[in-house]
Image (cartoon, rainbow, N blue to C red):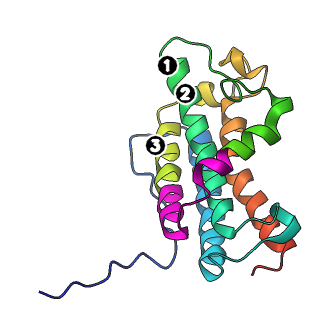
Amino acid sequence: MRHRPRRRPLAYQGAYDGGMPSERAKALTAKADRALAVLLERADAMQDAPLGAAYQFRRVADVLAHLHAWHLIFDGWVAQERAGAVPAFPAEGYSWADLDRLNEALFQAHRERTYESLRAMLVSSHRSMEHLLGTFSEDDLVSPDAHPWLGGQTLGDVADECLGEHYEWALRTLDATSVR
């Protein structure tokens, strides 16, 4: 029996297919899908390229790991809130002043992974975030009072920071290193 190598699609295809998402959720996922498709196309062309000073002398794969890790953090915030707890924002044991230390811990957790595994993890966590966003009402995503632990930020804005805005950061990082 001959085994054919599993091929991944050339470009990311949007994954949200659940229920009736709010208008804000639709806008967030559309923006994120567009940015992720561009990012993956570029990253696929330079999978393990070193990024030099633009990203602490790490690899393109490490950018994908960073994005994936922040999806998991967002998911954790939602899970904590839904369990009746006040989420650790940004993460247990970290304040926003410790962001560099948190990002270093995220890097250390994934630094040995291959590009292909990180790519698959990112696509999977992206899809999970889109489905998760579809579970929130419009008010949940746009009201600064809906989630007091966010300190006046809206959940939709924070989701955008973990999705579309973060993908745009990744593209700017690739731009700064001439990875095109």
Q: x, y (%) of residue 21? A: 49, 40
Q: x, y (%) of residue 49? A: 70, 77
- Compared to 80, does 66 lie above or below? below
The amino acid marked with disc number 2 is Val
- Label at residue 78: 2
Q: Which residue is mark 3?
A: 131
Q: Is residue 152 magenta?
A: no
Q: Earlier in the sequence, mark 1 or mark 3?
A: 1
Residue in front for this viewpoint, 38 or 176: 176
Real-space Cα distance between discs 3 and 2?
Answer: 12 Å
Q: Residues within 10 Å of mark 2 (few under 14, many from 20)?
A: some
Front of the two marks 1 and 3? 1
> Is residue 23 in view?
no
Q: Which residue is mark 1?
A: 82
Kindly check if marks 2 and 1 are in contact, taking CB atoms under 8 A apart as contact: yes
Residue pushed farthest bottom? Answer: 2
The amino acid marked with disc number 1 is Arg
- Compared to 37, does 84 lie above or below? above
| Number of marks | 3
Q: x, y (%) of residue 152? A: 79, 21
Real-space Cα distance between discs 1 and 3?
Answer: 15 Å
Kindly check if marks 3 and 2 are in contact, taking CB atoms under 8 A apart as contact: no
Real-space Cα distance between discs 2 and 1?
Answer: 6 Å
Q: Earlier in the sequence, mark 3 or mark 2?
A: 2
Q: Which residues are magenta?
A: 106-123
**The N terminus is located in which quarter?**
bottom left
User: Residue 112 vs residue 100: left or right?
Assistant: left
